[in-house]
Amino acid sequence: MAKVMTKGMLSSNTDEWGTPQYLYDVLDAEFDFEVDVCANEKNHKCPIYFSKEVDGLKQDWSNKRCFMNPPYGKEIGKWTAKAVESAKHGAIIVGLLPNRSDTKWYADVMKASEIRIIQGRLRFNDGAVGAPFPSVIAIWGTPTTPRVVYWGE
């Protein structure tokens, strides 16, 4: 049985993929986030969030517990680089990202202290079907031995 996807999921109509609430809730219970570093009025997960207008890339993330689901377009490498740098200054950043190990920016993901490879495909933006790509959770700044785990049901 073929799955039907919306045009936006297979095109560049948007580079924003709204975090599934259940996934955020599990991560927030573990990390107790203070700020959503790249969000908007409709999709922010924390009371404190950085919108496009505020530009989270220009903000100081030092010593904060940050949730990051960046736009998945050409600028994604700026977000992963910011996560790596901010972790050096005491931040803990949990990033929800496409699992695209063949890209240049993915080298920053490999610098994370933990990588959780999500089993299956997430349903973004309250989608009726899974995303057309696999996802990963990268955690920068935690004081653990680096590890990669499969995470999911």
Image (spheres, rainbow, N blue to C red):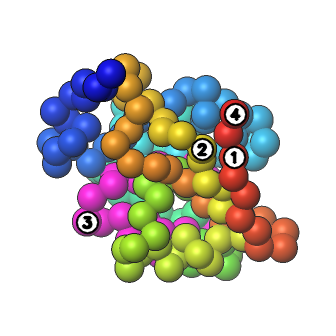
In the image, which is nearer the foreground, mark 4 or mark 3? 4
Indicate the position of residue 129 as horizontal and vertical percent values.
Answer: 38, 26
Q: Secondary structure at mark 1?
A: strand
Give the distance between the C-alpha atoms of the residues marked 1 and 2, in whole angstroms: 6 Å
Q: Amino acid at mark 3?
A: Lys
The reply to whether discs 1 and 4 touch (Cβ–Cβ < 8 Å) is no
Looking at the rendered structure, the kind of residue marked 1 is Trp
Mark found first going from the N terminus, 4 or 3: 3
List the residue tagged with mark 4: 153
Range shown magenta = 62-83
Q: Does 39 appear above or below 79?
A: above
Report the side of 54 relative to 81 (left or right).
left
Image quarter of residue 113: bottom right
Tell me the CA gap for discs 4 and 3.
31 Å
C-alpha span from label 1 to label 4: 7 Å
Q: Which mark is residue 74?
A: 3
Marks 4 and 2 sit apart, C-alpha to C-alpha, by 7 Å
Tags 1 and 2 in contact by the CB under 8 Å rule?
yes
Q: Amino acid at mark 2?
A: Gln
> Rounded to the nearest whole Å, what is the CA distance between mark 1 and mark 3?
27 Å
Q: Which residue occupies 53% across, 45% down?
A: 36
Q: Amino acid at mark 4?
A: Glu
Residue indicated by mark 1: 151
